[in-house]
Image (cartoon, rainbow, N blue to C red):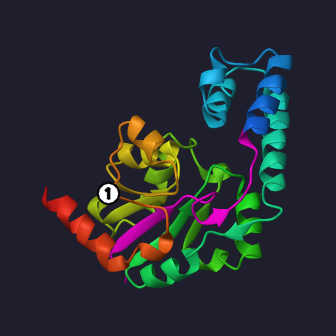
Amino acid sequence: MQSYGMIFDMDNTVIDSHIDFVRMKREVMANLSSGGCLPPDAEKLTVSEIMALAEKVPGKGDLIRSTWALIEQCELDGQRDVQPQPGIEALLSRLEETFVLTLLTNNAQSVAEYSLKKLGLFERFSVVMGREQLPALKPAPDGTAVMMQLFPYITRGHWLAAGDAWIDAAAAEANGVAFLGYGPGRAAVEAHGVRPLLWTEDWRTVSAQTLLQLLQERAEN
């Protein structure tokens, strides 16, 4: 039985997708605005934060559902030419003997399953959670907490979250979980006050042994 757990983000961490987040936010804001449901200062918020506030407005169920439909279409459009991130398949093979591998995404469950199955990666994860299964979306810590609760035999200090964005790091940090960063977004993550356990721009440079050593050192400090 693996005694460590790892929670991967999906887009731009496990897979190379091309979701147009600028388009998504524009369409979300326009749709919510048309129904008088756009939160104040929406320009400063992520789409998940906008939706979390909009869902609190009573009597707007149809508007919220239509907005989620727009979001899902943007997600699907971004998966058309999806590819695995370089080195991710070999990394999962290196980790799977030691870590329970899970995936947590703000995307729709159907989109996550479509992309991962298309690339032959779905079965590599013990659990794949899309937004329908989450109490709240990242950067909220709820999804990470739910994932950890599924594996009560893994202690908090033996968990590691991997992602490319500050929302992934924030969700991990709020749960006391170490963060492994990937890609070009390190400055944005650190600007939100998260110090990654390790940062890489190439999955081929990461080994299970290195991660275990860093987690052990973190526990001792």
Residue 36 or residue 211, whichever sits in front: 211
| Point 27% across, 61% down: residue | 157
The quadrant where residue 67 appears: top right
**In the image, farthest residue toward the left:** 220
Position of 173 relative to 53 (above/below): below
- Give the x, y percent position of residue 218: 21, 59
Decide whether residue 66 is among the magenta residues.
Answer: no
Dominant secondary-structure state across the stretch colored magenta: loop
Total tally of numbered discs in the picture = 1
Compared across the picture, whether 220 is left or right of 182 comes to left
Mark 1 residue crowding within 10 angstroms, few (<14) / some (14–19) / many (20+): some
Q: Quadrant of the N terminus?
A: bottom left
User: Badge 1 is on which residue?
Assistant: 197
Q: Residue at x 60, y 23 (%)?
A: 44
Tell me which amino acid carries mark 1: Leu
Tell me where residue 188 appears, x and y as whole percent: 47, 40
Segment colored magenta: 1-21
Of the 4 image quadrants, the one containing the C terminus is bottom left
Q: Nearer the viewer, residue 51 or 170?
A: 170
Could you say where residue 179 lies in the image, as x and y percent from the top left? 38, 55
Name the residue nearer the viewer: 7 or 27.
27
Q: Is residue 23 above or below residue 199?
A: above
Left or right of 110, for residue 170: left
Query: Label 1's element?
Result: loop
**61 displayed left or right of 220:** right
